[in-house]
Every structure is written in C-alpha cells, then in structure tokens.
Amino acid sequence: MSDLRIATILLAAGRATRFGGGKLGTALAGKPLARHVADSLSALPFDRKIALCSTQTPDLPRFSRILLDPPDAPLSQSIATGVAALTDEDAVLFALADMPLVPTDHFARLIAQFDGSMIATQVDGRNMVPAIFGKQHFEALKTLVGDRGAGALLNDAPSVELSPELALDIDTLEDLQSALEHIKGR
C-alpha cells in the first residue's frame, strides 16, 4: 500500500427489498453474505475499516460499526455518514456488502493504481464501485442525494476492469444461487 492513509467503508445497511429483507445475513457457502467482501477487505492493510450497518447486518470482524440513522435512509446517507466518520485519512475505498465475489486482488489493484484523486471499477464499460476517492472529493460525497450513490462522480475516472461475473450484486435469491454456483466452481 502507498504512503497514503486509506480507509475502507463497507456499505452494509441496505434494505434488501428485492431480496425480501435480511440478505446480508443469509448464508452463502457457509458464512453470511456480507462476510465475503468484509473478509476480502480485511486481508488488506487499510488504516481504518468501517461498516455502515443496519440492525440486521451480521457481525463483521475487524470493522467498526456505524448504524445508519434513520435505518431506511438512502444510499447517499450511508456514504455521507461514512465520510463524516473519517478523521485524517487521505482517501477512502467504498465497497458494497452484497458483492461477495469481488476478489481481494481486485481491491489491491485499485489501491496500487490509485493516483490520489479517484479510481473506479469498470464492468462492461461502466465505472462503478468498488472505488477509491481522495480527500478532495469528500465534500462532494457528503452532498450526494438519493439511492444512486457516487456513480456520477466516477464517469471519467481511471478504472480497473472486473469481469461481470465477479461484479455480481446479490439482489434476488437467483443472484444468491448464481454466486454459490460460482464459488463452487472455483
């Protein structure tokens, strides 16, 4: 990791309405869904590890928990709350707790290629999270609105490619089954 102080914020407070609720605690290959990405991130030497959680978010070892308030707040509120919790970090990596197949080496490549401003994950030509934002973007992150996240800030960012199968975002039981099949096929 570079000389920059980088925190990671795991967004793990979603309402999971398309899933029927409680998806982050649902078992995937023997552990809660949210633990897959948390364990991948824990393998890297971040200066701080924060999880933005709901009361349904399972235990995420090595992460400090912040409960989203109000619990039904949009994604933008999770991002703003996470950024407000930062202290002297130079950058922050955002990851989604419902993307269990993103490998540790992808996060490591993002860190290695981070230029101090921002870097995104690119899937099928579209920039998205996981992404790293330098502190010069913290104020913009705190002023986002709605459930769209920080995607608009990433449109022209440099990026690291990730295959669509590894970028699987678990929104339905069918997605969960696809993730399990991928894990078993490894």
Image: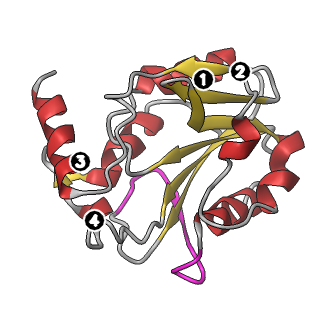
* Residue 1 visible from this viewpoint: no
Residue where numbered disc 4 is placed: 19
Dot 3 or dot 1: first in sequence order is 1
Residue where numbered disc 2 is placed: 158
The three-letter code of the residue at mark 1 reads Leu
What span is colored magenta in the figure? 59-73
- Spatial CA distance of label 2 from label 1 is 10 Å
- Spatial CA distance of label 3 from label 1 is 25 Å
Residue drawn at x 13%, y 48% as measured from the top left? 30
Dot 2 or dot 1: first in sequence order is 1
- Is residue 66 rendered magenta in the image? yes
On screen, 49 above or below 157?
A: below
Residue where numbered disc 1 is placed: 110
Q: Are marks 2 and 4 in contact (CB under 8 Å)?
A: no
- Disc 2 residue crowd, few under 14, some 14–19, many 20+, Cα 10 Å: some
- Spatial CA distance of label 3 from label 2 is 28 Å
Position of the C terminus by quadrant:
top left
Element at label 2: loop
- Spatial CA distance of label 2 from label 4 is 32 Å
From this viewpoint, which residue is outermost toward the front? 125
Question: Which circle marks residue 175 in the picture?
Answer: 3
Residue drawn at x 45%, y 66% as measured from the top left? 14
The three-letter code of the residue at mark 4 reads Phe
Dot 3 or dot 2: first in sequence order is 2
Q: Is the magenta stretch mostly helix, strand or loop?
A: loop
Q: Would residue 164 appear left or right of 184 to someone viewing this image? A: right
- Disc 4 residue crowd, few under 14, some 14–19, many 20+, Cα 10 Å: some
